[in-house]
Amino acid sequence: MPAGAFDSWGNFTSKHLEQVVNADGDYRNDHGVSLSADIGMMRKPLDVSDMTLDWVQHTEDTLFGDLDRSERNLLYMVFVREMDRGEIASSLGWRLREVNKNLQNILSKLRGWSELKP
């Protein structure tokens, strides 16, 4: 345990401990100074829906909406079902090389769409 002391409320304090922000965005540091954090982004809904079989069939997600059904299905198999590449190849009747190439193409496409443009 790092060097420190217990305060009058029985809480362990140390300059080595990480300060954690409360859910309301406020916290008090070791010197009693009250600080706030902008938590506005925490309250916004996510733009990406759950990856389910319905998602594979159709989605209006900004990021995934332009992928076709087979591309979303491959992502579903890799990231939700956690199937290995061999299982995917067997299931889809593809060669292992095709699985790897298609997955790489999809991920490259997503990376390109998600990059900030000047």
Image: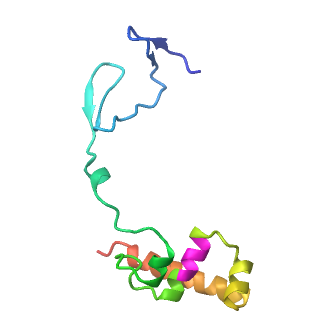
Is 84 left or right of 64, judged from the image as shown?
right
Tally of numbered tags: 0
Residue 1 lies in the magenta-colored region: no
Position of residue 18 relative to residue 114, above or below, is: above
Is 69 left or right of 26, judged from the image as shown?
right
Q: Position of residue 79 (x, y in %)?
A: 58, 69
Is 72 left or right of 85, judged from the image as shown?
left
Q: Which residue is pictured at 32% across the width and 19% down the height?
A: 31
Q: Which residue is pictured at 31% across the width and 60% down the height?
A: 45
Q: Position of residue 17 (x, y in %)?
A: 47, 27
Position of residue 90 relative to residue 84, above or below, is: below
Picture quarter containing residue 27?
top left
Q: Going by the picture, which residue comes out furthest to the top?
A: 8
Viewer-proximal residue among 67 and 32: 67
Viewer-proximal residue among 46 and 41: 46
Position of residue 45 relative to residue 21, above or below, is: below
Q: How is the image coloured?
A: rainbow
Position of residue 76 relative to residue 9, above or below, is: below
Question: Magenta segment range?
Answer: 73-79
Prevailing secondary structure of the magenta residues: helix
Q: Quadrant of the C terminus?
A: bottom left
Q: Which residue is pictured at 46% across the width and 78% down the height?
A: 54
Viewer-proximal residue among 45 and 12: 45
Q: Which residue is pictured at 28% across the width and 38% down the height?
A: 25
Q: Quadrant of the N terminus?
A: top right
Picture quarter containing residue 77?
bottom right
Residue 77 lies in the magenta-colored region: yes
Q: Position of residue 89 (x, y in %)?
A: 70, 85
Q: Position of residue 76 (x, y in %)?
A: 55, 75
Picture quarter containing residue 2?
top right
